Image (tube, rainbow, N blue to C red):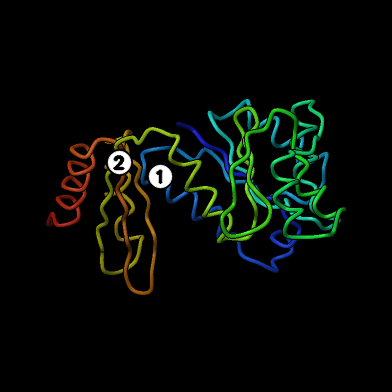
Amino acid sequence: MDFIIISVGNEILSGDISNTNAAYMAKKLTKLGHKVKKITTIPDDVDIIAEEVRKASEDADFVLVTGGLGATHDDVTAEGIAKAFGKKLVINREVYDWLSKLSRNEEAVRKISSVPEGSEIIWNDVGAAPAFIVENVAVMPGVPAEMENTFEKILDRFEKGSYYEDTVRIEGFEVKIVDKLNRVVEQFPDVQIGSYPKSGYVLVKFSGSDEKRVKEAIKKFEELVNAKG
C-alpha cells in the first residue's frame, strides 16, 4: 500500500521539537513492505490541514496524520480533517463520557471529544485524546507515546507485504563508488538503493520486495567495487 504521512504542528516547523513520529511510522511501514510516498509537515491551520489532507487522500491508499488533537487553542486538526471531507464536527458520546470521568473541564472534554461525523474511534491507552479514522485517513495524537500506542493498533489492519534489506560498507568517500553504483541502479530498477556517507566510509543500503533481486544487486555491486583495473 501507498501511504502519505502528515505531521501537524507549529512546534515542528519552528524547530522546537524533532519529527520523530514520522520517522517511526515510515520505518515501520517500510519494514512491512509498504511504500511511503511523501512526508509533509504543516502548521496548525485549519485551511492548510484541510487542503493537504484532501490532496493526500486522493494521492495515497491511506493517510496518517499526527498532532493537534488536544484541548488548547492551536489544536485544530480535527476541524481541519472535517473540513477536508465536508463533514461536521460532532461529539463522540463514548469519548465524552470517558473523559468526563477524568476531568471536570467541560470545554476541554467537549473539544477532545469532537471528531468528524462518521469517524471510528481508536482508543488511546496512554493519554486523553483518542485517535480516529475517517475515510482513508487516520488521525493520531502528537505525543510520541500516544502516537505509537494508537498507530500500532491501526497498523494491524494492513496486510504485511514482503520486504528485505541489507547494507554494504565501503571504506573511503562516496566519489569512489559513484560510477559503479549508478551501473547497479540502472541494472536493478526494482531495488531501492541508497548511499549514506559517514566519517571515513559509506553505507550503501539495498532494499526491496524481492529478496533474490536485492541479493543479486548487492552481489553485482560488490563485484564492481572489488574488480581490479
> Can you tell which quarter of the image residue 199 is in?
bottom left
Q: Tag 2, which secondary structure?
A: loop
> Can you tell which quarter of the image residue 127 is in?
bottom right
Q: Is residue 63 left or right of residue 190?
A: right
Marks 1 & 2, CB-CB < 8 Å contact? yes
Residue 53 to residue 143: above or below = above
Q: Is residue 123 left or right of residue 69?
A: left
**Residue type beneath disc 1:** Thr
Q: Tag 1, which secondary structure?
A: helix
Q: Residues within 10 Å of mark 2 (few under 14, many from 20)?
A: some
Residue under the image location 52 percent in, 36 percent down:
3
The tally of labels here is 2
Quickly name the residue at label 2. Answer: 163
Residue 132 to residue 67: above or below = above
Residue placed farthest to the bottom in the image?
A: 199
Residue under the image location 25 percent in, 52 percent down:
166
Residue 14 to residue 156: above or below = below
The front one of 150 and 42 is 150
**Residue type beneath disc 2:** Tyr
Q: Residues within 10 Å of mark 1 (few under 14, many from 20)?
A: some
> Can you tell which quarter of the image residue 227 is in?
bottom left
Residue 27 place in picture, x, y as percent: 43, 51
Quickly name the residue at label 1. Answer: 30
Residue 78 place in picture, x, y as percent: 75, 42
CA gap, disc 1 and disc 2: 8 Å
Q: Quadrant of the N terminus?
A: top left
Ranked by sequence position, the earlier of labels 1 and 2 is 1
